[in-house]
Amino acid sequence: MRALHWLTALLVVGLFGLGLWMRSLSYYDSLYQVLPFWHKSIGFLLCALVVVRLLTRWLTPQPAALATHQQWERVLAKLTHWLLYGLLFGLFVTGYLVTTADNRPGSFFGWFEVPVLITAFPNQEDIAGALHEYFAWSLIGLSVLHGLAALKHHWLDKDETLKRMW
């Protein structure tokens, strides 16, 4: 589960950086078509990884919260985890809607196509794109808070929270 956690974090940060880079490109840039291909393919991969992660989480017992954690910390941790998953799935859905807005399937690293399952709606690419960006920034912000909370447990509370994540 730890490996899935850190691989997810790495892919999220990488996709965010790739998304920012894509947004900075002009139409005539040689990477204008290349970077979205990689962003979409890695995004599909991340979606599969998160599904595996949730199944693993559901099928295996999770470590109990430390006895030193206050009730409000436990509630906030659970809420944060579910918000992180919610934002990830919001990103997957909106990314898919942007990818298929022209009623063409998405490509998974050129190995196979991800079919169009939802008929396009007016302004689909613009609406889904705006939501995708909002979800991405929200995910990064919440992830930073999540990381800061882990550091708070390590440095201020001096408990085992961060050590259990490695």
Image (tube, grey):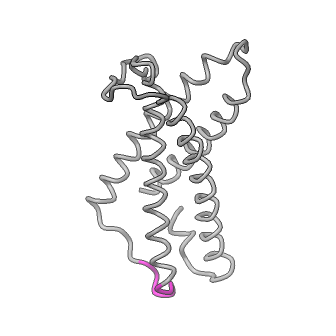
Q: Residue furthest front?
A: 122
Residue shown at the point (35%, 68%) measured from the top left? 62
Q: Identify the image quadrant of residue 38.
A: top right
In the image, the segment drawn in magenta is 65-71
In this picture, residue 27 sits left or right of residue 135 = right
The vertical placement of 149 against 118, above or below, is below
In the image, is residue 69 part of the stretch drawn in magenta? yes
In this picture, residue 94 sits left or right of residue 158 = left
Which of these two is toward me, 54 or 89?
A: 89
Which of these two is toward me, 2 or 9?
A: 9
Image quarter (top left, top right, bottom left or bottom right) of the N terminus: bottom left
Picture coordinates of residue 155 (x, y %)?
Answer: 68, 77
Dominant SS type (magenta): loop
The vertical placement of 67 against 57, above or below, is below
Picture coordinates of residue 131 (x, y %)?
Answer: 53, 43
Residue shown at the point (43%, 20%) measured from the top left? 107
In the image, is residue 82 part of the stretch drawn in magenta? no
Residue shown at the point (29%, 62%) measured from the top left? 60
Q: Residue furthest left?
A: 59
The vertical placement of 118 against 152, above or below, is above
Residue shown at the point (49%, 71%) measured from the top left? 77
Picture coordinates of residue 65 (x, y %)?
Answer: 43, 78
Image quarter (top left, top right, bottom left or bottom right) of the C terminus: bottom right
In this picture, residue 153 sits left or right of residue 100 = right
Which of these two is toward me, 64 or 70?
A: 70
Q: How many marks?
A: 0
The vertical placement of 1 against 44, above or below, is below
Picture coordinates of residue 61 (x, y %)?
Answer: 30, 67
